[in-house]
Structure formats: C-alpha cells, structure tokens
Image (cartoon, grey):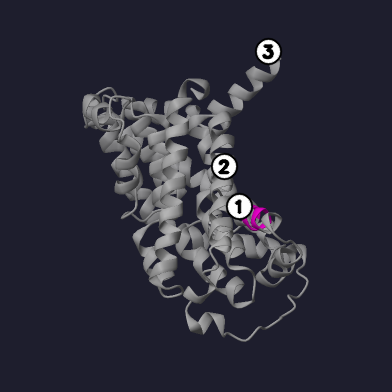
Amino acid sequence: MGLIKIIWNFIQNQVLGMQWLKELIGNGLTEAGLDVTSRLGGSIQFFIYDILKITILLCLLIFVISYIQSYFPPERSKKILGRFHGIGANMAAALLGTVTPFCSCSSIPLFMGFTSAGLPLGVTFSFLISSPMVDLGSLVLLMSVFGGKVAIVYVVLGLVVAVIGGTVIEKSHMEQYVEEFIRNAPGINVESPELTKKDRLLYAKTQVETTFKKVFPYILIGVGIGAAIHNWIPKEWIEMLLGNNNPLGVILAVLVGIPMYADIFGTIPIAEALLAKGAQLGTILSFMMAVTTLSLPSMIMLRKAVKPRLLGTFVAICTVGIVIVGYLFNVFQYIFI
C-alpha cells in the first residue's frame, strides 16, 4: 500500500503537476538574476510554469480525447443515445458529453443536432450540461492541481447535476420552448465512412491545432489572472471573500463566473492561485463550473435555439446544482485536502 502511495504521489506531483518543470524554471530565473521569492519574480515563474504545464497537458489531452471521439461521430452518437430510455438515456448522454468538445459554445451545435434528430429534450440537455463541465480533460487537469479524490468526486457530481438537470427538463415537457427551425428540421441519417487509423490520427492532430489556437488566448488570460492573485492580492482579501468566514462565498463565485468565458484550461490557473490564497475548495470548484457551463457567450448562442423560458429553466437548474456542489465540497473539504 505504501508503494502504491509513493507511485501515485510521483504521478501526482511530477507527471501531472510537473513540479520538476517549476523547479527548472525557478533555477533558470535565479541564474538570470531574478529573485523568484519576490512578487515580480514569483509572478513570472508562475506565468511561465503554468503556461508550459497547461500547454503540454492540453495538447496531449486533446490528442487522446479527439482520437477517442473519432469513434463517436454525431450520427453514431445519435444511434447510441437512441437505444436508451428514461434516466438511462440521460446517464448515457452525460457520459457521452465527457468525450466531446471542450467548451459550452462548441457543445451547442451538437445539442442542436441531437434535438433536431428527435432525441428527447431532457437527454440532449444532459449532454449539454456535462460536455463542458466534466470532460476527460477536466479530470486530468483537476488531478494535477487538487489530487485524484477531488477530481473524481468533481466529475461524479458534475455527471449527477447533468443527469438530474436533464431529467427535470424532460419531466417538465418543455419541447414547445425549442425554436421552430430546430423542431421542424428534417431528419437526415448520414452514415459516417469508416475511418482508418491514419485518418483518426490526422483528425486528432487537426483537433489539437484547431482547439489550441482557439483556447490559448484564454489560457494566457487565466494564467495572467492566476499570477496576479498568487503574488499580488493579499491572502486576507481572498479569505474574507471566498474563505470559510463568508457563507455566501459559493454564491458570489458563481455570480462572478457566469459572465466570464473560458474552458477548464483557462480556469485551472485561477483556481490554483485561489486555493493557495485560502479560498475554500467548493467555492473554487463552483466558480469553475459556472465559467465552463454558464458563460454569457454560450447562453447567447443557446438563446438562438431555445425560447427564454427553457433557457431560464436551464440556467436555474445548473446554478442550483453548482451551488449545492460547492457547499458539499466546502462541508467535506477536510476529507479531500
């Protein structure tokens, strides 16, 4: 058991966390005459280290996940989901969301396609909630910062929110609040050609290039904010707003996160810096969930597909679920850290 723990700690700290890279960058900056214990030096070290760490993990994750995703084109995904019924269909849709696009905006076109194809509305919403919130990339990146227990529980609770959210929407019978052009879209069954291994590798490589170009600006912004929080904002301020002395910290984090637009890769450095400054774990995770699931740009896109009442129901369900998850993590934080 002790050997397993040693191996896991090595994976956690050196493979996923890349502490060797942090030390290497720190030594290099010190050799260049920069004091990494100062605010400026610490900010520069944090910025370079997080940019390189997230970029390496990002490219590897996108490649692996995109290769897996090549086995689940939209047509095949529709057929798979069509085999399930009831809450089983919601669970299948939520799980399918873990191997699909990395942000809410890129999930919405798939949601629209599934809805047009006649899949139950609640099933498509379970997919829409889980896709940006709990993809496989979030599992690995969360493990690199918070550890395996936090990452696994985060993903499980995210899937629960997706399943319950989709089920509630399904039971509410809100199909009439989907825009006409989606409800009346003709069903088209297109058989996807069988891809060779070379095709899948090429697809994965293309997805790496496309996704990296799209999300890298948000990584830069996220790491910049994280560096500022980590080295310039007093710890007392963070503890006052997001620590255990503020019972409304989770709600505040969700309200701050909703207007932002980023994916899991852009929010990780901010979460890492907030945790180091004394913010509660659940408050940080609820902030990440709000940013990735309820960003303002994605809500604007979704509004083109659904009417205000359904959009409001979706936002309300997600917000309540995220707040509950945040408070659960805060209550049981001592178990995870």
Residue 301 in the magenta stretch? The answer is: no
The residue tagged with tag 3: helix, strand or loop?
A: helix
Q: Position of residue 244 (x, y in %)?
A: 33, 25
Mark linked to residue 155: 2
Which one is nearer the viewer's eye here, 231 or 171?
171
Disc 3 from disc 2: Cα separation: 26 Å
Mark linked to residue 2: 3
In this rendering, the answer to whether 97 lies above or below 277 is below
In this rendering, the answer to whether 175 lies above or below 252 is below
Horizontally, is 153 left or right of 256 in the view?
A: right
Q: Which residues are magenta?
A: 90-95
Residue that label 1 marks: 98
Q: Quadrant of the N terminus?
A: top right
Residue depicted at x 75% and y 69%: 195
Q: Position of residue 60 (x, y in %)?
A: 58, 48
Q: Quadrant of residue 203?
A: bottom right
Disc 1 from disc 3: Cα separation: 32 Å
Viewer can see residue 48: no
The residue tagged with tag 1: helix, strand or loop?
A: helix
The residue tagged with tag 2: helix, strand or loop?
A: helix
Number of marks drawn: 3
How dense is the environment of label 3, judged by Cα within 10 Å: few (below 14), some, or many (20 and up)? Answer: few
Q: Position of residue 194 (x, y in %)?
A: 78, 71
| Residues at discs 1 and 2 in contact (Cβ within 8 Å) | yes
